[in-house]
Image (cartoon, grey):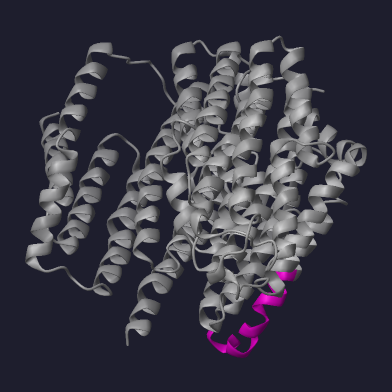
């Protein structure tokens, strides 16, 4: 239980760091760290398949995509970054309060339904689920990855060519 | 067979981007036009064999469980028409070959995603393909790399992510309380579920998420910016079909086909519809930017579709689907006209236009037709769909809402006629004397769409029998 709480606190801290850091590169690294911590939580909650996907896609592939994209952009100057941070704080100062209020409200309502996935769904082999039951999502995953890569090429690589 | 509608556009992107296929890239325009045109034509011949049609590649790979019904066929037709015309308009607007090639690739991604959205029979698959189409749309909006377009894209992405979180949470709850994500299984299991609060929460979250995607009031903040700041072909594509499929179609599908019929849900949908009609129409009256005005008009017209949906009767559903089709056509036409005007005058500010029907007669004439159809003037198509919506409201006892819907048509007519007067009528401004029709592609798109607007009105009985009435079957008509 203690390990679980520690991981949750670390996850929140890393998420905050990802949102508040000045460097986009550090944000991407924080995202990877956050996903790794989430993988541990998923594993502890007995969802190894979800954990594997989180680790491979969210902690691995997506940060790589982000970092390659960031490498194609022009970094802001220190003054611009500071100005952006100030603007962000001025515009969104109320967000942490909303999060706290919503959290407290949800805790007070304490909706804890006793729900569990139906047994046949849990007992199914992951290979059966992916290849036999839900192949259209596999196609969807391939499509979304290619669309993402294509988008990066169009918006950043082509932009670089135009600049030259 | 149905899977080809998803797989072929996607495979086309891969094949045209293969390294050894450089020489073939010049054909991407004609190939895509053939694909989209064939989709529009084939939808006339598609029959409704069953609710679950599956297609299997050799070796048991990629066996897709897809669904085809009257509503899907109508959507496939709309996607085919708007995608073909977007392609023609894009070819007129983008002269640079590399940009045109990239644009068509994104269009193919989006069409593949939208075809999947209308054919899948599973709520999680629906979510996955909504996201794929959305990704292609984000890039299309920021395609010109203009700062305002980038800012609009950012707003769209942020709101879309909120919508996606709502939808994912809803899907998770539905899976837990019904044990499945299949449309039919959820539909059968929801009424028997003992978790009434959670079921309502899931329904509410999903409807809210899709309302963001549809740009309905009060979730519409992103839509005017996106439509007005994106390029001509993109605003046509987004306003004509993308936001309709991702938001409106998905709403119709899940509300009427997946979730259980519920009076409170219907009342929420009617309220959202009525709010959208009036608030957006009043906002449209106050606009001086043509594309922004059309964006608000779009929200207002989607409100009418919601009224049909909120009736929860076979007639209401058929009316909603028919107004969906009409709105797709006349709003696409108005955006094609806006694109032509923007290209010729270099602005979308209506105060800087005037008397343009003298130099752009086809644009002016087709724009009047589209405006009259949008306002519900007989015998154009918009009249029939609004009439069906009003009758459906009357039959279900929503007399006040029916009266309000008729009243709102006057508002629609007033802002669209004001637009006509400012842009096309009166004395031609001296600085616009050089203007002329904006190229073959845009004129062709205007004529085709105007023809459909008139034909759908004049041949209303045929359209009603072939496309509209089959739509009601899925609600037990």
Front residue of this view, candidates A115 and B31:
B31
Q: Nearer the viewer, residue B105 or B307?
A: B307
**Percent x, y for residue B448?**
78, 60
User: How many numbered discs?
Assistant: 0
Any part of residue B232 in sight:
yes
Which quarter of the rendered picture does the C terminus of chain B lie within? top right
Q: Quadrant location of residue A108?
A: top left
Q: What is the x, y in percent for residue A10?
A: 12, 42
Say whether residue B122 is visible.
Answer: no
Answer left or right for B155 relative to B373: left
B107 w.r.t. A48: above or below: below
Q: Is residue B330 left or right of residue A35?
A: right
The foreground one among B105 and B243 is B243
Q: How far across and how far down the image is residue B381, in percent?
A: 80, 41
Q: Is residue B139 magenta?
A: no
Name the dominant secondary structure of the magenta segment: helix
Residue interval drawn in magenta = B19-33
- The residue under the point 59% across, 57% down is B237
Please state, as top left, top right, bottom left or bottom right, where the N terminus of chain B lies in the image.
bottom right
Q: Residue at x 36, y 77 (%)?
A: A159
Q: Position of residue B441 (x, y in %)?
A: 70, 71
- Among the 4 quarters of the image, the one containing residue A43: top left
User: What residue is drawn where x is 47% and y is 39%?
Assistant: B286
């Amino acid at each position: 239980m203690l390990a679980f709480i520690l991981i949750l606190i670390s996850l929140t801290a890393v998420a905050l760091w990802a949102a508040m850091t000045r460097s986009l590169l550090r944000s991407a690294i924080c995202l990877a760290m956050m996903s790794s911590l989430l993988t541990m939580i998923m594993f502890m909650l007995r969802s190894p398949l979800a954990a594997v996907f989180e680790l491979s896609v969210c902690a691995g592939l997506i940060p790589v995509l982000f970092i390659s994209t960031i490498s194609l952009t022009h970094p802001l100057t220190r003054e611009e970054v500071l100005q952006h941070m100030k603007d962000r704080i001025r515009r969104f100062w109320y967000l942490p309060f909303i999060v706290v209020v919503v959290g407290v409200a949800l805790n007070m309502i304490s909706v804890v339904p006793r729900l569990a996935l139906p047994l046949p769904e849990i007992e199914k082999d992951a290979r059966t689920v992916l290849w036999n039951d839900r192949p259209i999502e596999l196609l969807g995953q391939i499509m979304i990855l290619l669309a993402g890569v294509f988008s990066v090429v169009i918006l950043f690589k082509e932009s670089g060519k135009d600049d030259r | 067979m149905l899977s080809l509608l998803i797989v072929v556009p996607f495979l086309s992107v891969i094949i045209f981007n293969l390294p050894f296929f450089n020489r073939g890239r010049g054909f991407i325009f004609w190939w895509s036009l053939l694909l989209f045109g064939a989709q529009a034509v084939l939808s006339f011949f598609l029959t409704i064999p069953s609710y679950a049609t599956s297609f299997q590649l050799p070796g048991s790979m990629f066996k897709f469980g897809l669904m085809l019904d009257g509503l899907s066929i109508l959507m496939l037709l709309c996607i085919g028409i708007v995608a073909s015309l977007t392609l023609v308009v894009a070819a007129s607007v983008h002269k640079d070959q590399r940009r045109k090639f990239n644009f068509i690739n994104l269009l193919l991604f989006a069409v593949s995603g939208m075809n999947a959205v209308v054919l899948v029979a599973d709520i999680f698959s629906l979510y996955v393909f909504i996201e794929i189409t959305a990704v292609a749309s984000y890039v299309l909006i920021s395609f010109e790399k203009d700062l305002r377009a980038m800012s609009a894209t950012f707003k769209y992405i942020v709101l879309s992510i909120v919508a996606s979180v709502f939808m994912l949470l809803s899907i998770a709850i539905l899976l837990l309380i019904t044990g499945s994500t299949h449309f039919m299984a959820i539909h059968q299991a929801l009424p028997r579920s003992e978790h009434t609060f959670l079921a309502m929460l899931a329904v509410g979250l999903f409807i809210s998420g899709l309302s963001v995607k549809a740009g309905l009031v009060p979730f519409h903040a992103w839509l005017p910016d996106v439509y007005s700041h994106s390029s001509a072909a993109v605003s046509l594509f987004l306003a004509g079909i993308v936001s309709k499929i991702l938001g409106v179609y998905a709403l119709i599908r899940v509300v009427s086909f997946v979730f259980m019929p519920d009076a409170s849900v219907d009342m929420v949908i009617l309220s959202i519809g009525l709010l959208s009609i009036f608030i957006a129409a009043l906002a449209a009256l106050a606009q001086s930017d043509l594309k922004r005005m059309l964006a608000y008009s779009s929200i207002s017209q989607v409100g009418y579709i919601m009224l049909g949906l909120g009736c929860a009767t076979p007639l209401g559903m058929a009316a909603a689907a028919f107004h969906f089709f009409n709105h797709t056509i006349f709003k696409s036409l108005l955006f094609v006209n806006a694109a032509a005007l923007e290209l010729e005058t270099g602005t979308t500010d209506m105060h800087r236009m005037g008397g343009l029907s003298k130099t752009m007669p086809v644009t002016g004439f087709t724009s009047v037709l589209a405006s009259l159809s949008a306002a519900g003037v007989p015998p154009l198509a918009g009249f029939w769909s609004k009439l069906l919506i009003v009758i459906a409201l009357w039959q279900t006892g929503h007399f006040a809402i029916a009266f309000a819907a008729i009243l709102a048509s006057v508002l629609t007519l007033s802002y669209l006629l004001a637009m006509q007067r400012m842009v096309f009528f009166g004395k031609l401004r001296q600085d616009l004397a050089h203007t002329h029709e904006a190229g073959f592609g845009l004129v062709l798109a205007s004529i085709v769409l105007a023809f459909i607007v008139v034909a759908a009105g004049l041949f209303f009985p045929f359209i009603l029998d072939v496309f509209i009435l089959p739509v009601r079957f899925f609600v037990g008509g």
